[in-house]
Image (cartoon, rainbow, N blue to C red):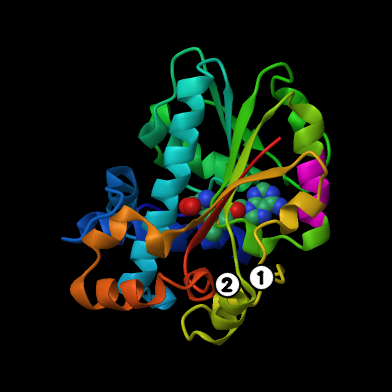
Amino acid sequence: MPIALPELTPLQETLWLTLCCRAIDNRSSHRILGDETADEIVRETGYDHSRFRIMAAGALNVAHRAKKLDEIARRFFARHPRGVGLDLGAGLDSRVLRVSPPPEAEWYDLDFPEVIDLRRRLLPAAATPRGVAADLNEPGWLDALPADRPAVIVADGLLAFQSEEEMITLVDRLVGHFPSGEIAFNGYSTFAVWAQKHYKGAESVARIAKFPGFNDPRTPERWNPKLRLVKEILCMREPEVALFPPLLRWWTRLFAPSATLSRSGNVVLHYRF
Ligand SMILES: C[S@@+](CC[C@H](N)C(=O)[O-])C[C@H]1O[C@@H](n2cnc3c(N)ncnc32)[C@H](O)[C@@H]1O
């Protein structure tokens, strides 16, 4: 029996797209991430994802970038066991279960109040240790988080819905709040933004997307002088490509030698401050 789901805004509704992608990845014989919680939520709610027209490659890309962001967070906690983890625009993601921070660490998931409420209803308790119910572009919500510990801040699928000015303000606030830390998010090249606008099935996302895209991974260094690029992760060059289905693997390996072509695909950007 499908669970009655609340009415969400189109922006909040995008959480189902990424959740369904991870669920599809989990059911695939070419599994990249293995997010069983996402799979369970999609099954239990009976959410109909057919309107997103998710292609196998799209699901795999979402799972792949989530894996890269998880790895960044895991490495951070290995160095900072008392650190803070913050997932911006967490949707229904149960990243904290995959990352499994040390017991002394603190993990926070931020999203709109309606989404944080839904997280509490649909996710296992261990996946919702601390929800921050806020619009991340409003000031004040950071006051509830420790300001004396380093932080790893991840944003998966969020950037598309921010303007560049909003990103600059957000980064300023984060860098001003924590003594040091790391910020990682999936990037959008100008080609990726163009492709999103023209792909049938992504209309609901394209209508509300605001970010113009950039091709130079050092662009965010100009948003805040403390931000330094650690690595531009071009997913086409990552070892998980060996797990891709044959045709996609062949295509990816054709593109991978060129940084420009690799940037047309999945990119995870990692900075420190
Ligand atoms: C594409 S979904 C990604 C969700 C999740 N990170 C994932 O990978 O499944 C984008 C999420 O960002 C949240 N979001 C977008 N803009 C936001 C804002 N200004 N404040 C808080 N949350 C926001 C949406 O509510 C949504 O849950």
Q: Quadrant of the N terminus?
A: bottom left
Q: Which residue is mark 1?
A: 209
Residue 152 x/y as whole percent:
59, 33
Residue drawn at the location 76% of the way across and 53% of the way down: 167
Q: Is residue 170 magenta?
A: yes
Left or right: residue 33 versus residue 141 is left
Q: Quadrant of the C terminus?
A: top right
Residue drawn at the location 30% of the way across and 72% of the way down: 56
Q: Secondary structure at mark 2?
A: helix
| Distance between the alpha carbons at the discs numbered 2 and 1 | 6 Å
Tell me the tag on residue 193: none
The reply to whether callout 2 and callout 1 are in contact (CB within 8 Å) is yes
Q: Secondary structure at mark 1?
A: loop
Residue 66 x/y as whole percent:
43, 50
Q: Which of the 4 image quadrants contains residue 260?
A: bottom right
Q: Is residue 235 magenta?
A: no
Which of the pair 168/96 is nearer the observer? Answer: 168
Residue 128 in view in this figure: no
Q: Which of the 4 image quadrants contains residue 121?
A: top left
Residue 41 in view in this figure: yes
Question: Is the residue marked by circle 2 packed among few (<14), some (14-19), or many (20+) residues within 10 Å?
Answer: some
Residue drawn at the location 27% of the way across and 48% of the way down: 34
Tell me the tag on residue 205: 2
Farthest residue, direction left: 29
Residue 59 x/y as whole percent:
36, 65
What amino acid does circle 1 point to? Ala
